[in-house]
Image (cartoon, rainbow, N blue to C red):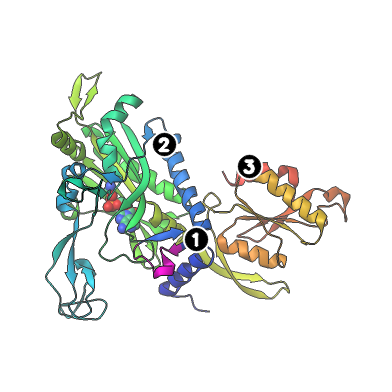
Amino acid sequence: MSAPSDTQRMEKIVSLCKRRGFIFQSSEIYGGLNGAWDYGPLGVELKRNLKNHWWHVTVHERDDVVGMDGSILTHPSVLRASGHVEGFSDPMIDCRTCKAHLRADQLVEKKGVKQCPNCGGKDLTAPRQFNLMFETHVGAATDESSIAYLRPETAQSIFVQFKNILEVSRKKLPFGIAQIGKAFRNEINPRNFTFRSREFEQMELEYFCRPEQGMELLEYWKEERLKFYENIGIPRSKLHVLTVPDEERAFYSKGTYDIDYDFPFGRQELEGVAYRTDYDLSQHQKASGKSLEYFDEEAKQRFVPHVVEPSAGVDRTVLALICEAYSEDQAPDEKGKMEMRVVLRFHPRMAPVKCGVFPLLKNNPQLVAKAKEIVGLLRPYMTVFYDESGAIGRRYRRQDEIGTPFGITVDFETLGEKDPALRDTVTLRDRDSMKQERVAIKDLPEIFRERLA
Ligand code: GAP
């Protein structure tokens, strides 16, 4: 069988996401809301595992980073000072033939003539700037004075709370403020499943430093972020670091890297790591009239700190995790005949369900009682799924398809019926190798503690 094309692979992934409850189209029963997605029971677990791991390694494991959770509704002055009101826009072009609204960079060029990628039409409007921010009104009035914005990035609330957090945390430079939360952009053309959405989540760290530390810390955070992706199961070989050229970089940035991943629809950005100099804090200091300076007691110096920002997308990373995990192989069915198996090879740390527990037969009260006892034993430490319906091979397949790394089967040996020495042991099956080992029930928590670490 030839390898499926990347388009086919993506279609299979999107279909699996819906079939098994990872990701649904938002407002689907009303025809869907373009650019918005709902995460189902498994998707929400995967997303939480990712966010928890990011928070753990970025905040909990470090002395030099604290967290915050800012509001989504944002004062217009914040976004005027940051430059978003004036400049956060994409050039938009309309196709007069099929009425599509297109980002200028989405046009296709044939024989030197720009065309609409949907209908091939050449009757296109001139580009005009389209601001990507969602505007809303706060309070009863809906006039100029009540305008607020849904934040287009989490970063700005970190900058405007810099002084408060510095005071309460009593950190010394270099130190960071981390945040995970929703951001909103009215993308002209949401596409590639969740990749470009209008509502999405970011995991952002603003790491403040002295000016002379900026370039070195840019390198440091690029490497840290690459390690992060490897530690959640995205191999280094599929990650690509792009040095953003001078002419494409924000004017205030002294260096920016994009970390790209090989998605089935092409190599695309997962995260940006940027040295933003003192631009943001200086802008807010100027606009608010409040000092955002740092006082270095040893050097007796007062200055506006510089910042290095690793900014990752939660939804894009979830999509990368699913794309990376998706695989098809061959496995024997109940009669030993080989059949195609769909398996999500998630890193155990990311897997939404860590362990399936199966009594061999559902109509044997002793097997069922033992299996439920194991569920009770493991549930305080991990997500466990109990399944008693269907042939055992089918139950394994169902868990393989959602990426459950371990399966425990309670059989007659567990009850000590064949060999008393095997009483209170179970088979522990590995999703990837499909190998089974016999282990004592009492050892399970320790085995999982090691394998899920
Ligand atoms: N504070 C810097 C900042 O927001 P960005 O490159 O515009 O930089 C950072 O966004 C990350 O947020 C991106 O690398 C991507 O992972 C995610 N992101 C941005 N726009 C997105 C969208 N429309 N849909 C999903 N994720 C998005």
In front: label 1 or label 2: 1
In the rendered structure, which disc, 1 or 3, sits on the residue that comes first in sequence?
Answer: 1
Judge whether residue 302 is colored magenta: no
Q: For the residue marked with disc 2, what is the amino acid?
A: Val
Give x and y (percent) for residue 111. 17, 81
Residue 91 visible in the shown view: yes
Q: For the residue marked with disc 1, what is the amino acid?
A: Phe
| Magenta region, residue range | 24-35
Residue beneath label 1, please? 22
**SS category of the residue bearing label 3:** loop
Give x and y (percent) for residue 436. 70, 57
Q: Are marks 1 and 3 in contact (CB under 8 Å)?
A: no
Q: Are marks 1 and 2 in contact (CB under 8 Å)?
A: no
Q: CA distance from mark 3 to mark 2?
A: 24 Å
Judge whether residue 31 is colored magenta: yes
Q: For the residue marked with disc 3, what is the amino acid?
A: Pro
Give x and y (percent) for residue 421. 85, 48
Give x and y (percent) for residue 84. 19, 49
Residue 301 falls left or right of residue 48:
left
Q: Nearer the viewer, residue 204 or 211?
A: 204
Residue beneath label 3, please? 380
In front: label 3 or label 2: 3
**SS category of the residue bearing label 2:** helix
> Residue, x 37% and y 51% (percent of image)?
201
Within 10 angstroms of label 3, few (less than 14), some, or many (20 or more) residues?
few
Residue 150 falls left or right of residue 441:
left
Residue 216 visible in the shown view: no
Residue beneath label 2, please? 59
Q: CA distance from mark 1 to mark 2?
A: 27 Å
Q: Please say if 27 is above or below 365.
A: below
Q: Please say if 379 is above or below 213.
A: below
